[in-house]
Each structure stands twice: as C-alpha cells, then as structure tokens.
C-alpha cells in the first residue's frame, strides 16, 4: 500500500494542512507520494495554501492573491480552530521550501495542485512560470495537477512534466475532454465515481481517487482499478497495511 497512497496536504488530521512539518512526518513514515495546493501571492510567490484566503490556517482574513508574501509569512498558520496553540510557530511556506524538503527524499513524488483562484487572478501562463521556476531543482519529482486545463496545457508546452486533470464531474463531455487532453493522471473524488459495475474510462492515464481514509475502502478501490489514493491519514493506513500483511504471514 505504500506505493499507492498519497499524503493529501500532508496529514491534515495531525498537522496543519500543507505544512512542512506535516509533509516531513509522512515522508519519514514512508510515504512515496504527497499532494499539496499552491496559490500565488500579490508579489508573485507560490505558497502552500488551499483556500484563496488564509482564515482557516491563521484566523486572519487576508486573501493570498492580494497580499505580499512577507505579510503572510508573519502570520501564525497553525490552524488554531483545530489544533489550538500546538503549532503556534507554524507559518505559511513557499513552494520552494517544499522543493528543498523533496531533495532529502529523492524517491518521493509530489502532486502539485494549481488552484483556480490564482489562475483566475494572474492567468495560467504567469502562474505556471513562477511555479515551474520554484520547482526547477526537483522537477523530476513533480506532477502538476489542476481542475483547470489551461495550466496543464501550459505545463506540457513549457516542460516534460506529467500532468493530472482533476475531474469536475463524471459525464460524457468530461470523458471526451479527458480523451483530448490525454493526461498521465485522471483524478476523481470518490463521491463522483459511478457505482460498480460501471467501468472506469480506459485511456493512457493512471486513476487517482480522493479522499480515502479507511483501509478496507482503499483496498476495494485499488482492486477496482484505482492506481493511487489520496488520504488524510496516510500514516494510519500505512500501519493498517503492515498489520494486514503481518496477519497473512
């Protein structure tokens, strides 16, 4: 299971989401894949943040795309509503800090999700130029993913990186769009998957499903043909896999 699990935003049940401490913890536990979200600050710095604003992480209402990085960096980002003061020293990290962490785990791969808010503010070309520049030393370890196709097309033009399209819905028009794009990965919410026995769409891609937090469900989805599974509890599922393996011995 180690090779099919993706640490979704690190491990947000135990650490502030998209925090370096969370990513380091899951990599130390043996994670091969991690996933993060990227927004762009007002002064063009790619940072690890899912939402357009930082209210959940910091308690402040600053909008990432309207705020410079130095201002964001001063805000404690320990997700106080969930963790209290446990991570009071946490700060919003720039993408380059995650790149430095990846260099310590050369076998690890990161799915880097380019968020729609930043694309809408700055345009796909500018967003992807700053992201690819920040990742330049670890490009071989990265997969660019997005709900939007424009940044994926730009990535294909500017680099040889694999891309992953996050499906907005399960429909025939979506399938036709996937067949035109032909990404290396198709990414789907488990809630959008059709019930069995309807098959997964065949194609040149690997299937990724999010968010799966139960071991039994993870194994059933993998048996169905899902290649990779995003989870919020990757260390727990890695322990589950080891215990299951020990029980079969």
Image: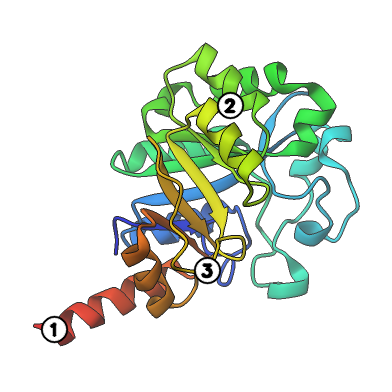
Above or below for 37 versus 31: above
Distance from the alpha carbon under mark 3 to that under mark 1: 29 Å
Instruction: State yes or no: discs 2 and 1 in contact (Cβ < 8 Å).
Output: no
Could you tell me which residue is drawn at 52 percent across and 64 percent down?
A: 11
Determine which quarter of the picture holds residue 80.
Answer: bottom right
Q: Residue furthest bottom?
A: 247
- State the quadrant of the N terminus: bottom left
Could you tell me which residue is drawn at 46 percent across and 47 percent down?
A: 201
* Residue 65 can be seen in this image: yes
Q: Nearer the viewer, residue 124 or 197?
A: 197
Could you tell me which residue is drawn at 64 percent across and 25 percent down?
A: 151
Label 3 or label 1, whichever comes before in sequence order: 3
Q: Which residue is mark 1?
A: 248
* Residue 9 can be seen in this image: no
Mark linked to residue 152: 2
Instruction: State yes or no: discs 3 and 1 in contact (Cβ < 8 Å).
Output: no
- Kind of element beneath mark 1: helix
Could you tell me which residue is drawn at 60 percent across and 18 percent down?
A: 154
Distance from the alpha carbon under mark 3 to that under mark 2: 29 Å
Q: Residue furthest left?
A: 249
Label 3 or label 2, whichever comes before in sequence order: 2
- State the quadrant of the C terminus: bottom left
- Kind of element beneath mark 2: helix
Label 2 or label 1, whichever comes before in sequence order: 2
Q: Nearer the viewer, residue 60 or 194?
A: 194
Mark linked to residue 195: 3
């Amino acid at each position: 299971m180690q090779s099919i699990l993706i640490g979704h935003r690190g491990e947000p049940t135990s650490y502030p989401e998209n925090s370096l401490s969370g990513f380091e913890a899951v990599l130390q536990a043996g994670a091969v894949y991690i996933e993060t979200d990227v927004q762009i600050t007002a002064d063009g710095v790619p940072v690890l943040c899912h939402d357009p604003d930082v209210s959940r992480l910091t308690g402040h209402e600053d909008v990432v795309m309207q705020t410079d990085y130095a201002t964001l960096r001063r805000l404690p980002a320990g997700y106080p509503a969930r963790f209290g003061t446990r991570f009071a020293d946490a700060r919003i990290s720039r993408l380059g800090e995650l790149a430095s962490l990846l260099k310590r785990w050369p076998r690890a791969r990161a799915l880097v999700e380019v968020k729609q808010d930043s694309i809408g503010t700055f345009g796909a070309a500018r967003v992807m130029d700053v992201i690819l520049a920040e990742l330049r030393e670890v490009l071989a370890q990265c997969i660019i993913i997005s709900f939007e196709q424009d940044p994926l097309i730009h990535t294909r033009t500017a680099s040889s990186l694999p891309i992953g399209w996050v499906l907005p819905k399960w429909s025939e028009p979506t399938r036709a769009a996937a067949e035109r794009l032909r990404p290396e990965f198709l990414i789907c919410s488990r809630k959008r998957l059709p019930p069995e026995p309807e098959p997964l769409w065949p194609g040149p891609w690997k299937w990724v499903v999010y968010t799966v937090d139960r071991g039994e469900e993870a194994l059933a989805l993998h048996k169905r043909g899902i290649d990779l599974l995003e989870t919020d509890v990757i260390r727990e599922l890695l322990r589950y896999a080891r215990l299951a393996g020990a029980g079969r011995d």
